Image (cartoon, helix red, strand yellow):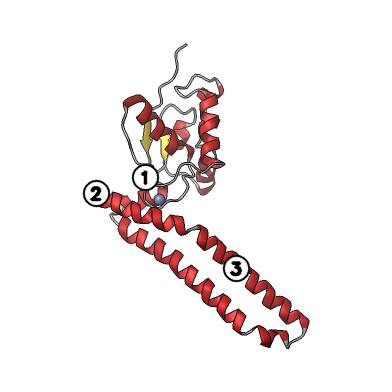
């Protein structure tokens, strides 16, 4: 059985588009309205392509489904520069295709880093992103310390104020947890900067 070989291009927003996708002409249509852009974001996946439905793509339907589970549920695909999860399926498919078919290794890059790379400000943007994570971490810790030190003041007030105090400290802890979870991203960004310096500058 013959199958369709995918072929890819990248648009000005860094989105990977398959030239054999059934909606290709819509994807590359110039001057799309905001609504059409949103529609494109929804349609830009193998699952809306006729070749996926007919199961005649180079990637069998079963494999595409597995890749999608690895991407969305297991979060196995992350950006080489910033450590963010890759939110577009075709970026992953393109990488796997080039590796499988031609043994070409290309780094997985999220759209935001693609944009920074295109504008020659990747290192600067990575620095901003990592500083933002660090700053949020410091603010959460300072907030918790402040709330802890003022606990007696709130305890002496009517119960409603203590409930507010409790809610604030709870949210600060949840922020703190969130930022601790992003610490691995700081490590990814550090590696991403090193990778950039080795291969792009
Ligand atoms: Zn990125």
Mark 1 and mark 3: Cα distance apart in space: 40 Å
Horizontal placement of 176 versus 102: left or right?
A: right
With respect to residue 24, does 129 lie above or below? below
Mark 3 and mark 2: Cα distance apart in space: 38 Å
User: Are the residues flagged by discs 1 and 2 in contact, CB closer than 8 Å?
Assistant: no
Among the 4 quarters of the image, the one containing residue 133: bottom left
Residue 98 location (% of width, % of height): 35, 30
Pointer 1 or 3: first along the chain: 1
User: Are the residues flagged by discs 1 and 3 in contact, CB closer than 8 Å?
Assistant: no
Q: Secondary structure at mark 1?
A: loop
The residue labelled by disc 2 is 198
The residue labelled by disc 3 is 173
Query: Residue at 49% across / 31% down in the picture?
Result: 23
Q: Secondary structure at mark 2?
A: helix
The residue labelled by disc 1 is 12
| Residue in the foreground of this view, choosing between 119 and 185 | 185
Horizontal placement of 119 versus 185: left or right?
A: left
């Amino acid at each position: 059985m013959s199958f369709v070989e995918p072929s890819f291009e990248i648009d000005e927003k860094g989105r990977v588009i398959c030239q054999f996708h059934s909606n290709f002409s819509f994807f590359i249509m110039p001057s799309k309205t905001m609504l059409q852009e949103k529609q494109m974001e929804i349609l830009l996946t193998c699952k809306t392509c006729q070749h996926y439905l007919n199961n005649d793509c180079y990637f069998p339907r079963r494999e595409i489904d597995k890749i999608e589970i690895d991407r969305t549920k297991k979060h196995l695909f992350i950006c080489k520069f910033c450590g963010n999860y890759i939110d577009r399926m075709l970026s992953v498919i393109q990488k796997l295709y080039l590796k499988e078919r031609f043994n070409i290794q290309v780094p997985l890059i999220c759209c935001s880093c693609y944009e920074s790379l295109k504008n020659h400000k990747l290192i600067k943007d990575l620095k901003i992103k990592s500083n933002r994570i660090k700053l949020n971490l410091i603010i959460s810790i300072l907030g918790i310390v402040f709330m802890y030190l003022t606990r007696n003041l709130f305890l002496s007030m009517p119960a409603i104020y203590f409930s507010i105090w409790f809610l604030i400290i709870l949210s600060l802890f949840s922020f703190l947890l969130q930022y601790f979870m992003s610490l691995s991203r700081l490590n990814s960004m550090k590696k991403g900067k090193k990778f950039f310096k080795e291969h792009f500058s």
